[in-house]
Amino acid sequence: MKKLVFVQAGFGAGGAEKIINLIARHRHERGDEVTVLALYGSPEESYFPYPPGITLKTMEGDGQRAKPGIRGALMQALWVRKQIKSIAPDAVLSFLTRVNVISSLAMQGMSIPLTVSERNNPNKQRNGRVWRTLIKRMFARADHIVLQTKGSFELLEQDQYAKATVIPNPCFIAGHRTSKKRDKKHIVAVGRLTAQKGFEVLIKAFAKVNAQHPDAKLTIWGEGEERENLTKQIEELGLSEVVSLPGNTEAPMEWVKTAPTLVLSSHYEGFPNVLAEAMSAGMAVIATDCPWGPSDLVSDSVNGLLVPVGDSAALSRAITRLLDKPELQTSFGREAAKTASKFELETILNQWDQVLDRP
């Protein structure tokens, strides 16, 4: 039995939270003592359920709220350090750049192995000089680095290659599959309502689609700071009757059942969870050829469609192509499911075990 600590930002509905939940449950089932630390929110707010026996703790749940900027990061690092010293785990796993920096600061002088998982494209993140320095030190402090794509691996310093591993996200649906009875003219997109996800490009593209297919509908699942701007854009384009922003689904993966086609419009990704999940469910997919991830999964015109990043005209043509030829939705979905089978959950969890069980 091992004592493991996982560190994340919060207990939201994001891809990082989902993967931590999967690994935590898996290790708990193996008999490990697992604690999940979060900097924000409360355990009761967790979108992904944790079984009894896994300890969940948050900084805000302890009555502490970090201030903005570096000062707040130091407060969070002190809290994480206190928890780790109290638990005395055999290994620590941290997810996402800011949390990884905080974890590395918290563990200075400790001999406990630290694994950091980078889930996004660091070249696309806006970091000042201080944060760039801290990120560099974080990579130096980490005992193991887990990345999601070959592209992200190639950005590392050459002397970091030996301690880095590429582990893609698993594709699994756990009983959820798209239905052949779903409206062929219903398109979905899923993700945080942030600038990164490019939903403003998708909405602009759908305005052109609507001119040719007025009965087509677009649903964008998710929450985030861009909701007001996206709502305004939808209204200004006269799309309020055909484009909706319903928020998060009540349960994980429920969006899979709602439509046969998913669009990923991101400007950049670390690894596109929703794209992998949609393909695993047998959905047809359209994705921007952004760094990184989509081109690792999608072979253009074989198991989906790839379009240039930020190109609303190309995106509208791709959507229209599938709406004009519903048989393509079926064939792309069938081929997508074959591709996704290479990323089965058990295989991916075994790769995580190999990392966490290293000395």
Image: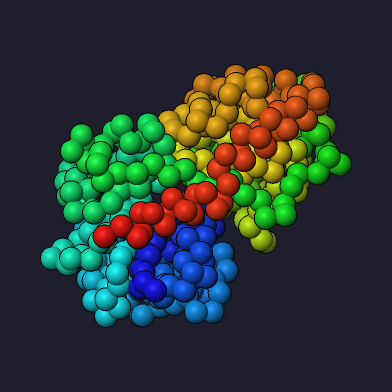
Q: How is the image coloured?
A: rainbow
Where residue 226 appears, as percent x and y from the top left, is 51, 46
Q: Residue at x 37, y 31 (%)?
A: 151
Against 24, residue 218 (above or below) is above
Against 341, residue 49 (above or below) is below
Where residue 94 appears, as percent x and y from the top left, is 34, 58
Q: Residue at x 55, y 43 (%)?
A: 343
Left or right: 97 with respect to 331?
left
Which quarter of the rendering shows the N terminus?
bottom left
Where residue 298 appears, as percent x and y from the top left, is 57, 28
Left or right: 46 with respect to 143?
right
The answer to whether residue 318 shows anywhere in this view is yes
Count the labels in the image.
0
Foreground residue among 216 and 273: 273
Q: Residue at x 50, y 46 (%)?
A: 169
Foreground residue among 33 and 101: 33
